[in-house]
Amino acid sequence: MVQDNGKEPTLALKLRVWRQRRGQPGAFEEHSLAAVPTSASFLEMMDMLNEQLIKAGKDTFAFDHDCREGICGMCSMTINGMPHGPIPGVTTCQLHMRNFRDGETITVEPWRARAFPVLKDLAVDRSGFDKVIQSGGFITVRTGSAPEANNIPVPKPIADEAMDAAECIGCGACVASCKNGSAMLFVGAKINHLNILPQGQAERDRRTLSMVKTMDEAGFGNCTNYGECQAHCPKSITLDVIAKLNRDYLRARVKEFFSSTGKPSKGGD
Amino acid sequence: MKEASAPMNLDPKTPAGPLADKWNNHKAKLRLVNPANRRKYHVIVVGSGLAGSAAAASFAEMGYEVSCFCYQDSPRRAHSIAAQGGINAAKNYQNDGDSVRRLFQDTIKGGDYRAREANVYRLAQVSTNIIDQCVAQGVPFAREYGGLLANRSFGGAQVSRTFYARGQTGQQLLIGAYSALSRQIGLGTVKMYTRHEMLDLVLVDGKAKGIVTRDLVTGAIESWSSDVVVVCTGGYGNVFYLSTNAQGCNVTATFRAHRRGAGFANPCYTQIHPTCIPVHGEDQSKLTLMSESLRNDGRVWVPKNKADCTKPASEIPEESRDYFLERKYPSYGNLAPRDIASRAAKEVCDEGRGVGQVVDGKRLGVYLDFSAAIKRLGESEVRARYGNLFDMYQNITGENAYKQPMRIFPAVHYTMGGLWVDYNLQSNIPGLFVGGEANFSDHGANRLGASALMQGLADGYFVLPYTVTDYLAGEKSGSRPSNDAPEFKAVVKDVNDRVAKLLSINGTKSPRYYHKALGKITWEKCGMARDKAGLEGAIRDLQALRKDFWENVKVVGSGDALAPELERAGRVADFLDFGIMMCLDALTREESCGGHFRTEFQDAGEAKRDDAQYAHAAVWQWTGEGQLPARHVEPLVYEETQLSTRSYK
């Protein structure tokens, strides 16, 4: 932090940044950047690099970002091989330059995952996540049809557990950090949020089966318990959501098997 | 300023009858559309925040064909997500005397009597439905051990009516609305267009009949025809460059609609939030809000003596601390409304008693101290209530707020002005509806905490579905024009020309340079305190900056790919024109009210309203490129509210 008697410390950095156009192969570009204040966020450092590029008449690096306060889930850089960089529990926008050393070389890449194709430079397409939610990540309640809120008591421990899972911001760091490109932490978080609440019971099995099916179709890999996702989740979602997802999935499959009458479905949905 | 160049229809269409009955009576008279006919109507919703997502989901549930557009990569990322503190509702679960009438009174008083009475009453009425809807969707609101919903108190109210989900109520409510929207997308009833930015509005025979967008990934400029256009694109806080808004938040959709004839109401009503992390340096891109809920347990102070300002807080004894909010406003104390708390902080810093680092020759920060709360409740309870905010503070400043007080300073946070709408949330352009922060209707000159989420969802879930249906009932189904119509082609050409122009100037200064320069002018001259000479100077400076922009901006990248600099340039260009209008509005409102504080109009530091002259909404009309807009007024009629001087003492 800045002291009254002194200037803010600054860093001189070497940056290796990924450059790619959609559908074409990419490569690293190297740039030097001087006088980066340690109080700047990582994205503000990237802004400085882009302003330097504009001055030189070169194209800037495209990267996703929006709220810059760690909640929208839009920012998505792999920094020195780690999604959201070296500090646990923060998004790239909340990573500050005081965590880097003067003279350091920093490597900046997009999310690396088959299910997240690169759109340009550091920006990727994460619409696979939206598709998973569209297939079941909701409680069906039409506007206007809700009962009085306090008619559905939710024990505090359940509400707190649902909230722990609901903190997921859908950034995709779990997928980017996983060798398999698995989205199990993301899907597990959503399943845990909705499946443990009383409101979520009616669609519990259907939701689980449908979301897992869509997850597989969207090109996400399987979970083999590396645990990298937990280590890089900026909201510190833990692996037990995956265990509970597996449990709910098994439960739904077993129930589906035993409730099957062998007759074709009558439809209705 | 030109006086009224062309007439504007500003009939608020407020229903007759007692305030408490207006909405129900009105709903009973609104026309309906037969369920089998609804699929023949195409509704465009622009923006996917609380208002947009809620509206799009609700329209689709009703059976309309819906298209929804957002600039983010997923509708879940709209900036409603960043709201931290909570959402108000008149449930009176705390048995502390709350009621619809009380929430209405607090909101209209909080807005310094510059909002439309009937709209505010309706907002208070539907607030209770919102909580029901959100709980049913699975929003994990805070609970008591009995399993029922918990509440906290918030600025500007003496009851506890705020529902919350840790420090991320906005994200949880948005995920609720997003899940409802996602369900409809999955069912095929909503077509979702992410990474699309609305760049213009298309009018056919004077009615809104579609939009023109740019696909941010491919650069394609496309037009979309519809029976009605609903714009829920948020506020214009980024006209100040540094604000708590997301980087992408912009005025383009509403300003483009304004250029096509929609009135823009009260642009000078901007809210400065008292509890943000102070500015740290030149390359800063964003200011971060610390939830107002912190003021429940934090005490705001500065040293009594200037000489103490450079000392660490721990070395300043209790008797040398000035708890200025508690001193000036004993009955509300640290929970005084946002505009009042912000100005009080500015005042002590202007006196030279601010703390923290020196920016532009001043220490712009005050302490928000939790030591008393930690002593009273224990650190673990404080952590349970505000842990994520303390963590965020530490990430940004490198300081531990459990050990030393936070430093805070006001920052631009919300904008109460917006496109003018009538009681039905329809602008003066038929078929153009506006919801959420993008309209001007409910917060007057100042918004109370925990009311933005309430308004966004009220508009989206419980107002627009009724009023848009009434409009569509008057439009023949299947009558919408094709997007091959000449009106569409003309607008597409305008948009293409503008994009080409921005890319071709090839000057020397980046779009961010102009955005920063714009922000410096608006913050200094049209920020927390405003005066005539400053505003006149700001308008001249902005006109010069605007001219410079169109001659010297350099936009790198290409039109056929993801081009962040092109996006920024287009938004900054609109902000420059908008900034001039905002300053003009501040200049011509010769009174102080809510967030609009003119130093010439005050009573020993308190805002001095002029109800005889200014109990109206100022509505601005576009008069042409480079021209000053024209001012119109909608008088505010108060049937049941006694206008009084706001006092929180």
Image (spheres, helix red, strand yellow):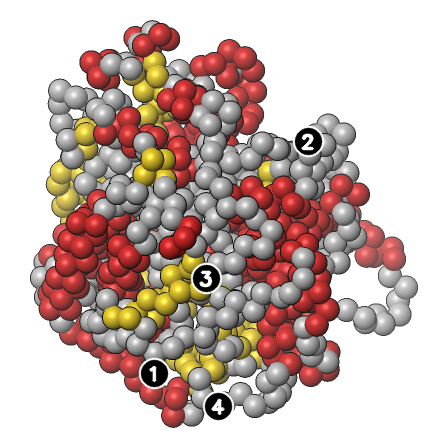
Mark 2 and mark 1 on one chain = yes
Q: Which residue is mark 1?
A: B492
Asked where in the image residue B602 lies, by quadrant, the reply is: top left
Tell which tag, 3 or 2, sits nearer the viewer. Answer: 3
- In the image, residue A26 lies at what x, y percent? 28, 61
Circle on res. B635: 3
Q: Answer few, some or many: residues within 10 Å of disc 2's Cα (few below 14, many 20 plus, some between 14 and 19).
A: few
Chain of the residue on which disc 4 is drawn: B
Tell which tag, 3 or 1, sits nearer the viewer. Answer: 3
Q: Earlier in the sequence, mark 3 or mark 2?
A: 2
Asked where in the image residue B406 lies, by quadrant, the reply is: top left
Q: Earlier in the sequence, mark 3 or mark 1?
A: 1
Mark 3 and mark 2 on one chain = yes
Q: Earlier in the sequence, mark 2 or mark 1?
A: 2
Q: Which residue is mark 4?
A: B482
Tell which tag, 2 or 1, sits nearer the viewer. Answer: 2
Q: Which residue is mark 2?
A: B96
> In percent of the image, x 63 and y 74: which residue is there?
B469
At label 1, which amino acid type do we have?
A: Val
Image: B645 above or below B563? above
Q: Are marks 4 and 1 in contact (CB under 8 Å)?
A: no
Query: Which quadrant: the N terminus of chain B?
Result: bottom left
Q: Are marks 2 and 4 in contact (CB under 8 Å)?
A: no
Chain of the residue on which disc 2 is drawn: B
Asked where in the image residue B618 lies, by quadrant, the reply is: bottom left
At label 3, which amino acid type do we have?
A: Pro
Q: CA distance from mark 3 to mark 4?
A: 39 Å
